[in-house]
Amino acid sequence: MCDPIMQVEVIIPTQTKYLNLIGSIGEHIAKELEDYSGDREMLAYHLNLVLTEATANAIKHANCNDPKDSVRITIHIDDHELKIKVYDHGQGFDLEKVDIPDFDHPKEGGMGVYFIRTLMDSVTYNRMSDCNVLEIVKHLK
């Protein structure tokens, strides 16, 4: 593993009013990646969307909007990849059983996991001893 270029950790109450903050952190990080050869504006947009969707899911589904609970988000960047982890304390879910949205009959909601999977290179969800972890990876090289 390479030495990290940047590490960020944010812990927020399970309140959706913090979603803009989380998304903007992703945008700013993408725009500052000096050695990234791809489209930084597009990466910034993707990270905003992915971080917002992953955090919203943790707030709304995993922690049932309990304002006393919290969601922890870590972002680790090295020369080769950007790794996001979203930690929640909910009941968990089976990532493999999340259906692809019906684009012929779209409905509000239900698109977050699809966007995350489509825009990033790897997505896993695991139960740990005291929490669940959604891990999202984007290769930078």
Image: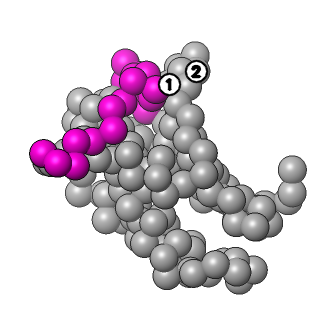
Residue 96 percent coordinates (x, y): 46, 26
Specify the quadrant of the image occupied by residue 62: top left
Residue type at mark 2: give it.
Answer: Met
Magenta highlight range: 88-105
- Residue position for label 2: 128
Residue placed at 87% from the left, 50% from the top?
Answer: 1
The answer to which of 15 and 115 lies nearer the viewer is 115
Q: Residue furthest front?
A: 104
Q: Does any portion of residue 119 appear in the rendered image?
A: yes
Q: In screen coordinates, is 67 left or right of 47?
A: left
- Verify whether residue 116 appears in magenta: no
Task: Give amino acid for label 1.
Answer: Cys
Q: Mark 2–mark 1 contact, CB under 8 Å? A: yes
- Is 89 a magenta residue? yes
For label 1, the crowd category at 10 Å Cα-Cα, with few meaning under 14, some 14 to 19 and many 20 or more, is: some
Badge 2 crowding class, 10 Å Cα cut-off, few under 14, some 14 to 19, many 20 or more, is: few
- Give the image location of residue 18, x and y in percent: 30, 57
Residue 2: % across, % down: 86, 57
In the rendered view, would you say 104 is above or below 139? above
Report how far apart the C-alphas of labels 2 and 1 lie in the structure. 5 Å
- Circle count: 2
Query: Is 26 or 50 nearer to us in this picture?
Result: 50
Q: Main secondary structure of the magenta part?
A: loop
User: At numbered mark 2, what does the secondary structure look like: helix, strand or loop?
Assistant: loop
Element type where label 1 sits in the image: loop
Q: Is residue 93 left or right of residue 122?
A: left
Please name the residue that numbered disc 1 is placed on: 131
Q: Is residue 123 left or right of residue 21?
A: right
- Which quadrant of the view contains residue 17? bottom left
Establish if 14 lies above or below 99.
below
